[in-house]
Image: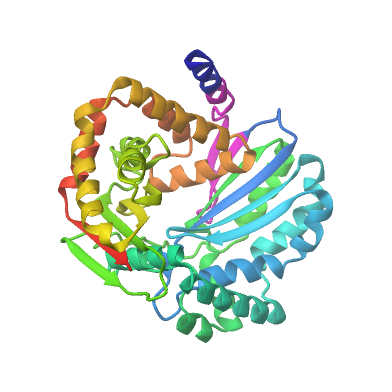
């Protein structure tokens, strides 16, 4: 079984190998080519530097609303489904991400519509009003969902005034003030070449690459957007409690400052999050659910971020068990390394590698990873290095990564 897993991982690594080129257009757009001519599709992914970090509490939610209205207002969306393709846009903490995927044989039929989508973003007033209403309804629904509400509360608490603490959907107050004109201004500020990274992956011709470069070359260069990372670390221990009388069980989050995606310990912390809270064989699950019977839902998360991230332990449980759960999480965090075995490391490593490699097999995901790692400063071809680093991480590397648990933490409780 282990040999079969290793063979599968080796095969997936081989077909994931970066093959292409990289150039910078005159307006600053970074353009990446990933030739995968054994596929029959083509994906164009582009990242714009600055997601919710562009926003303030006053206009929080503008990126999410723009992404939705921009796509729905486009002629491209009206045509693409007929050809079996798709176009999507979303806002994250660090980037606005847009994906255009199509069977390669139909790309030329849609390139004109794609050009208008990128260079002449349209905001339909009726779609704007409808999506604004939908976004506000989503915010209300999230407030009634304990999982969403508690996560938002934790992020606001752990990041304090840093933009990472804002939710991408915004607040009822901020979204209510957003106008269609605000979206038009946002689009002009967003779509500037110096902040854009494009990755094209799949089956394409030299002529199609030339046309895509011409499309993105039409964008204004604009000004570089800098993601400010000051104050993204936890400065001191804190504990925040919110109350909800209708809650069936408490929601507990314990978070620590974790490395950005460009830091040396990034890959080791990714593995560590699976060791501690990655599934039914994880340390949190076996102790907090299996042994103590505290929780149905328990796990760990480590989001990839340009600035300082968080290692997050989360659990839903009866409120009377919260004090012991916090103590247990802290104990597991600091003591798991003492009996971590090579066998456990191999099992977790193979699981993580398999998950990443299977996920990365689409052209869209290959392009996504290229854009992401290019923006971390590690380079668009870093994905294969990342896989090799994961394969080579040992117990000593995990021990070094676990030093983050010696730092200050945020404890958030919704009860």
Residue 281 image point, x, y percent: 39, 34
Q: In percent of the image, x 35 and y 54: which residue is there?
A: 315
Q: Nearer the viewer, residue 215 or 89?
A: 89
Say whether residue 304 is visible: no
| Position above or below: 164 against 378 | below
Where residue 228 appears, as percent x and y from the top left, is 31, 62
Q: How many marks?
A: 0
Residue lying at 36% horizontally and 52% vertically, measured from the top left: 306
Residue 144 pos. (x, y %): 48, 73
Of 229 and 278, the residue lying toward us? 278
Residue drawn at (51%, 86%), measured in percent from left and top? 177
Query: Against 223, is 287 above or below?
Result: above
User: In the rendered view, does 186 fall on the left or right side of 405?
Assistant: right
Quadrant of the image occupied by residue 71: bottom right
* Quadrant in the rendering for residue 288: top left
For this orientation, the residue located farthest to the top is 3
Q: Nearer the viewer, residue 270 or 415?
A: 415
Check the picture and name the quadrant holding the C terminus.
Answer: bottom left
Residue at 39% across / 69% down in the picture? 166
Q: Is residue 241 magenta?
A: no
Where residue 219 sits in the image (x, y, percent)? Answer: 59, 61
In the image, which residues are magenta?
Answer: 11-34
**Snapshot colouring:** rainbow
Q: Is residue 23 left or right of residue 130?
A: left
Q: Is residue 252 visible?
A: yes
């Amino acid at each position: 079984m282990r040999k079969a897993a290793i063979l599968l991982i080796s095969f997936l690594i081989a077909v994931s190998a970066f093959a292409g080129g990289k150039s910078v257009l005159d307006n600053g757009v970074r353009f990446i080519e990933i030739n995968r001519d054994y596929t029959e599709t083509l994906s164009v992914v582009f990242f714009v530097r600055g997601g919710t970090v562009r926003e303030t509490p006053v206009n929080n939610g503008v990126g999410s609303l723009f992404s939705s209205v921009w796509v729905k207002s486009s002629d491209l969306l009206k045509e693409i489904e007929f050809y079996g393709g798709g176009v999507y846009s979303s806002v994250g903490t660090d980037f606005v991400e847009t994906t255009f995927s199509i069977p390669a044989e139909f790309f030329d039929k849609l390139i004109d519509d794609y050009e208008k989508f990128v260079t002449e973003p349209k905001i339909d007033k009726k779609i704007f009003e409808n999506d604004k209403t939908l976004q506000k309804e989503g915010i209300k629904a999230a407030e009634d969902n304990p999982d969403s509400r508690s996560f938002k509360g934790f992020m606001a608490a752990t990041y304090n005034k840093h933009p990472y603490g804002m939710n991408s959907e915004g607040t009822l107050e901020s979204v209510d003030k957003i106008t269609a004109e605000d979206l038009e201004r946002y689009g002009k500020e967003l779509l500037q070449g110096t902040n854009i990274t494009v990755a094209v992956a799949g089956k394409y011709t030299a002529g199609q690459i030339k046309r895509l470069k011409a499309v993105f070359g039409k964008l204004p260069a604009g000004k570089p957007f800098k993601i400010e990372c000051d104050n993204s670390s936890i400065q001191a221990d804190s504990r925040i409690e919110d109350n909800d009388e209708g809650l069936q069980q408490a929601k507990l989050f314990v978070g620590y400052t974790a490395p950005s995606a460009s830091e040396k310990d990034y890959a080791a912390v990714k593995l560590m999050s699976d060791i501690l809270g990655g599934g039914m064989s994880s340390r949190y699950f076996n102790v907090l659910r299996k042994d103590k019977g505290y929780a149905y839902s328990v796990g760990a998360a480590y989001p990839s971020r340009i600035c300082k991230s968080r290692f997050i332990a989360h659990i839903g449980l009866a409120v009377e068990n919260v004090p012991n759960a916090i103590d247990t999480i802290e104990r597991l965090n600091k003591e798991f390394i003492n009996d971590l075995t090579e066998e456990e490391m191999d099992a977790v490593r193979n699981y993580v590698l398999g998950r990443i490699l299977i996920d990365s097999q689409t052209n869209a995901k290959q392009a996504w990873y290229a854009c992401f790692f290019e923006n971390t400063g590690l380079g668009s071809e870093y994905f294969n290095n990342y896989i090799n680093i994961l394969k080579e991480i040992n117990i000593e590397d995990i021990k070094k990564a676990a030093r983050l648990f010696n730092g200050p933490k945020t404890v958030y409780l919704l009860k």
